[in-house]
Amino acid sequence: MCTQCDFRDALFAKGLLIDTGIDGLYGRSGVFEDVIARFDDLITRFGGGDGADIVRFPPGMNRALFEKSGYLKSFPQLAGTIHSFDGNDADHATLLGKLEGHEDWTQDQKATDIVLAPAACYPLYPVVARLGTLPDDGRLYDLQSYCFRREPSTDPARMQMFRMREYVRIGTPEQVTEFRQTWLERGPKLIACLGLPAELDVANDPFFGRAGRMLANNQRDQKLKFELLIPIESTEKPTACLSFNYHQDHFGSLWGIVRADGTTAHTACVGFGMERVALALFKHHGLDPKAWPAGVRETLWG
């Protein structure tokens, strides 16, 4: 019995999500998008007064910068690249012949200089480095983008293409840890406004391979990552809907982001899984937003 399929199929039947034939790749209805937009507004109500610079990157990013980021060292199983036809007339004829014969036509596609962004913040750090020395009070950014991670699943909360809203703080260790602590307090309050059960817990990223297990253990031991977990498909294994990450000087060292005194900048971020929170709302309050509890509707629609 597939409870994940039951919820996903109910979302399909209601028209909230649209089946594309690929697990984790869905269309969204106007109702679903309205919930996303209202949640987006709620995030801004909690964090918009902090004075963040708003930046919106496309879902694709520079392949050379992606390679330098080290993502492939830790998460090769999740990465997505963009390939394209790069041939002549004869190559095109070969491609068409393979299509007609129901053969694999993708072998002749070549990698472009664009890859799919795995997180909203990945294109940001090299841009900040190009701006030069950080001001004394550091920098704060408000980001949102579609992201891609290759993990097909019947669980509708584990999409392959999804939206991530992030606030990213860059500065001294004290500045960024204070930022993260602020959001560790704000995040549960924000979700409580939506009438959703949630639990904050230490977490780790899905690092690949044997060396990855050591990195994951180190990340947990140092409490560099927390997640706000909301039960969507399972109370035993709730879904991470918000994440709170302290990168230490990883990105600062990688991209050469420095402060006026010459020290390497530290970074931290809070990330919001937009579709995941929307799905949690539909799961706990029902598939018709007009019937949601009055307090939740007041929070989202005013």
Image (spheres, helix red, strand yellow):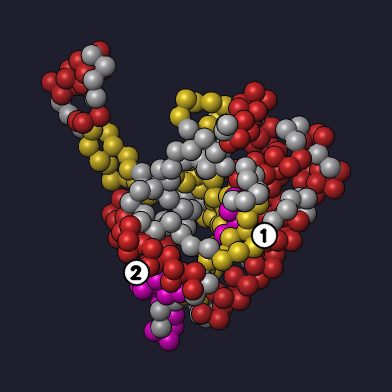
Residue 194 in view in this figure: yes
Residue 188 falls in image quadrant: bottom right
Look at the image and say whether residue 221 sits in the magenta stretch: no
Q: Position of residue 137 (x, y in %)?
A: 55, 78
Are the two marked residues, 2 and 1, in contact with CB atoms closer than 8 angstroms?
Answer: no
Is-magenta flag for residue 246?
yes
Q: Callout 2: 10 Å neighbours few (<14), some, many (20+)?
A: some
Q: Nearer the viewer, residue 267 or 15?
A: 15
Q: Which residue is mark 2?
A: 254
State left or right for residue 34 relative to residue 216. right
Q: Amino acid at mark 2?
A: Leu
The mark nearer the N terminus, 2 or 1, is 1
In the rendered image of this protein, does residue 93 appear above or below residue 143? above
Q: Which residue is mark 1?
A: 199
Q: Which secondary structure, mark 1?
A: strand
Q: Which residues are magenta?
A: 238-262
User: Can you name the residue that lies furthest to the right here?
Assistant: 294
In the depicted view, which residue is nearer to us: 71 or 153?
Answer: 153
